[in-house]
Amino acid sequence: VQLQACGGGLVQAGGSLRLSCVISASIFGTHVMGWYRQAPGNQRELVAQTTQSRTWYADSVKGRFTISRDNAKNMMYLQMDSLKPEDTARYYCVTSSNEYGLGSLADIWGQGTEVTVFS
């Protein structure tokens, strides 16, 4: 397994969760890493991505979610605050060697972790 996400769970609206992703050392040095999510019946959505020098967030999570990486531990995180029921989805950590970002055939996916936000 090259990417392993964990940290999902059941949380009340307004609460917080921190997702973690362990990334194999053989692919950790790839150009970009990030998080997608997919709710049942919905298309997958890119939530956040990061390179060594910049980050990007979807408008739907901007100001509430924070992506970070720990190069020494081969880890990536997604701190999710002020959670809303519409954040309910399965969250996937993804890496890619594509310098232009995620969303190409170069993406490598983990198996995801479930987040459920109830009101």
Image: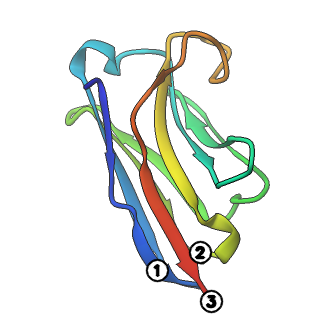
**Crowd tier of the residue under label 2, counting other residues whose Cα lies within 10 Å: few below 14, some 14–19, many 20 or above:** many
**Mark 3–mark 1 distance (CA, rounded to whole Å):** 9 Å
The numbered mark at residue 83 is 2
- Look at the numbered disc 3 and give the secondary structure of its residue: loop
**Mark 1–mark 2 distance (CA, rounded to whole Å):** 8 Å
- Circle 1/circle 2 CB separation < 8 Å: yes
Q: Amino acid at mark 2?
A: Leu
Q: Residue at x 60, y 33 (%)?
A: 54
- Determine which residue is flagged by label 3: 119
- Circle 3/circle 1 CB separation < 8 Å: no
**Crowd tier of the residue under label 1, counting other residues whose Cα lies within 10 Å: few below 14, some 14–19, many 20 or above:** some
Front position among marks 3 and 2: 3
User: Mark 3 or 1 closer to N-term?
Assistant: 1
Q: Amino acid at mark 1?
A: Val
The numbered mark at residue 47 is none
Quadrant in which residue 28 is drawn: top left
How is this picture coloured?
rainbow
Q: Nearer the viewer, residue 23 or 119?
A: 119
Q: Nearer the viewer, residue 106 or 25?
A: 106
- Determine which residue is flagged by label 1: 11
Image side of residue 86 versus residue 52, left or right: right
User: Mark 1 or 2 closer to N-term?
Assistant: 1
